[in-house]
Amino acid sequence: MLVRVKSKLWAALGSSEARHGGRMKLLVRIQVAVAQCTGHGDVPIEDRYVDEILFLVSNAPVSAAFLSRRISARLAATRDPVVALKALLLLHRLLRGGDRRFEREIGTLWSSGELEMDLSWCSHSFLVSYSSFLGDRMGWVINHAGMLEPIRAHQSREEEEAESILHMMSRCQVFLDRAMDCLPQEETSWPSQVMQSAVDIILRESFRVYRSFCDGLAILLRCSFQLRKSSGDLALGILKEACIQTPRLHEFYENCKRRNLGRILDFPSVRIITIDQISSMRQHQNEVQGNNVEESEASRTRFLPKLETKITQVWVAFDEEDSTTSASSAGESRG
């Protein structure tokens, strides 16, 4: 009996050590792959290393925290702009390639401060702008249709569709601002291969987010008269911002094309939002609200005379009947 118990204990211990050893090997493989992705050479990150990291993390979910610490450490330890750019690009590619669980885990690690993008040593404007872009990108996920959508922390089931669309449009505007900040300066010493790769991904995602914004805008312009006052004010604020942003976005895309950034991409045609459209929307809302007030007043006016007439007729009829009855009673009494 004692021998049997000892045998089971040794088997359990061996199994635990095997699991621990397997996990250590997995973490080492992740560390090596991160190092291979973030070398000093100005060469694009190889797909096989990105795929390997995603495969390893998918087989050990807790390893996402280890991965985030390795990327953070790589950024903090280097003073080489190319290495830093590769670390940011690796993070971006992992976000694009990972599943929904991985995206949310990385976003949580970023919110908690476990994932850091410390570039306090860096004065390169593209790197600083790219890290700000990625900070906002942590709040987005890729849905089943392959489109980016913002994560909502507290989305109630009762939330109106209009409010959800307005929230999405507002987040799209922030995303596009961050993307436009990532335009490399003309005098930069890099249009390096790594930067080209990063800009291509930023542009691809901005195209999708802009398409989502346009879809929301079409719904907004079609249904603006149905918005509550608070939602209507938010919608007008979004349109006012669009008057400023859409010409900038158009110029941003034109600059990218002139400088052969994203040269293999199909750029969208940007619809410029004008003040006239805002004025038209505001006028339409005022007209609809005015018509609603007039219709409400007309309905009340039509209803009240009928009610008063009916009451008057009843009382007149009652008075005449009462008078006839009283006169008849008086005649019989005299008779």
Image: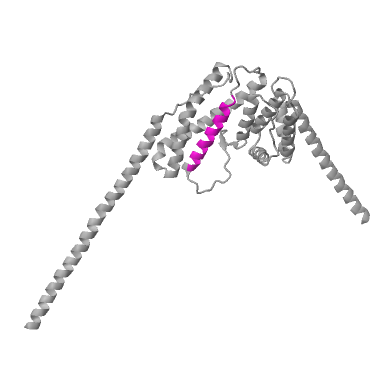
Q: Main secondary structure of the magenta part?
A: helix
The type of colouring in the image is one colour
Please state if 30 lies on the left or on the right of 106 as rendered: right
Residue 95 or residue 86, whichever sits in front = 86
Q: Position of residue 91 (x, y in %)?
A: 68, 31
Q: Residue furthest right?
A: 3
Please state if 295 lies on the left or on the right of 127 as rendered: left
- Residue plotted at (47% across, 29% down): 244
Visible residue check, residue 290: yes
Locate the C terminus and report the quarter of the image it occupies: bottom left
Q: Is residue 166 magenta?
A: yes
Q: Is residue 302 above or below residue 56?
A: below
Visible residue check, residue 52: no
Q: How many marks?
A: 0
Q: Position of residue 55 (x, y in %)?
A: 72, 34
Residue 82 or residue 211, whichever sits in front = 82
Q: Position of residue 72 (x, y in %)?
A: 72, 33
Q: Is residue 222 above or below residue 201?
A: below
Locate the N terminus and report the quarter of the image it occupies: bottom right
Residue 55 or residue 334, whichever sits in front = 334
Residue 209: quarter of image? top right
User: What range is drawn magenta here?
Assistant: 163-182
Q: Is residue 23 magenta?
A: no
Q: Position of residue 262 (x, y in %)?
A: 58, 20
- Residue plotted at (51% across, 22% down): 251
Q: Residue furthest left?
A: 335
Residue 323: quarter of image? bottom left
Please state if 286 lies on the left or on the right of 203 as rendered: left
- Residue plotted at (28% across, 51% down): 299
